Image: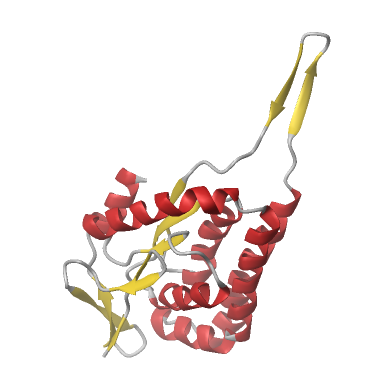
Amino acid sequence: MKKILNYINGTLQEPISGQFLDNVNPALGEVYSLIPDSDERDVELAVKAAQDAFPAWSSLPKDKRSAILIRISEIIQERLEEFAVAESVDNGKPVWLSRTVDIPRAVDNFHFYATAALHTSTESHSMENTALNYTLRTPIGVAGCISPWNLPLYLYTWKIAPALASGCCVVSKPSEITPMTAFMLADVCQKAGLPPGVLNIIHGLGPKVGMAISSDV
C-alpha cells in the first residue's frame, strides 16, 4: 500500500514515530494509502531545516525566487490530470471539479504570488520638514501554515505561495483527511529546484502536528 511521507529539508521521510494512519477513499470507504502519524519531533526537524534555509532563501534575488515558483506552477499544470484524479480520490469530489477549479487555482496561486513579488513597493510619507517615514517590506522568518480538507491543494497553495514568494520559509500541515496532493507537491518542488528546507510538509493530526506548529513557529 502506498505510503505518504513527510517532506523535510528537501527529502521524503517517514515519521519519527514509525506510525501511520489510514487514508480513506471517501467514495468507496476503503483505505488506499497511509499517512504519517507525525508528532512534535518531526515538526522540530522541519523548523530547524526552515531556519537554516531562511538566510539564503530570503537573500535570494526576487527574480530568482519568482522563477522557481513559476516553474512549480508549470509542472503542476503539466501534471494537471494526475493531480485532478488524485484530488478526486482523496477528497471525494468529481474529477471535473478538481480539473477545472482546484488544480488550476493552485497553479494560479503560485504564478500570481511569484509575479506579485517582483512588483512590491516601498511606501514613504513626508513629515514636512521634519523627517521621512518609510515602510520596507522584508522576509520575517519561518511561517507556519495549516490548511483544510475541502479545497486541499487550492487552499494549501494559497497559504504557502505568498510566504515563499516573500522570501519566508514554511513549515506546513495539510489536512490529514486529504494529504495526497500536498505529498505530490513535494516531488514537484524537488523537480523545480526549490532549495532544501524552504518548504517543509508535515502530515498528521491537529493535536500533534498542528499544535506543535502553532506553538513553535
- Residue appearing at x 45%, y 73% in the figure: 186
18 to the left or right of 158: left
- Residue appearing at x 33%, y 51% in the figure: 213
In the rendered view, would you say 130 is above or below 135? above
Q: Quadrant of residue 145?
A: bottom left
- Residue appearing at x 26%, y 63% in the figure: 205
Q: Quadrant of residue 113?
A: bottom right
In the rendered view, would you say 1 is above or below 170? below
- Please state which of residues 65 and 207 is positioned toward the viewer in this rendering: 65
Residue 95 % position (x, y): 53, 87
Q: Quick one: quadrant of the N terminus?
A: bottom left
Residue 121 % position (x, y): 75, 41
141 to the left or right of 79: left
Residue 102 % position (x, y): 56, 74
- Residue appearing at x 54%, y 54% in the figure: 57
Residue most extreme to the top: 130
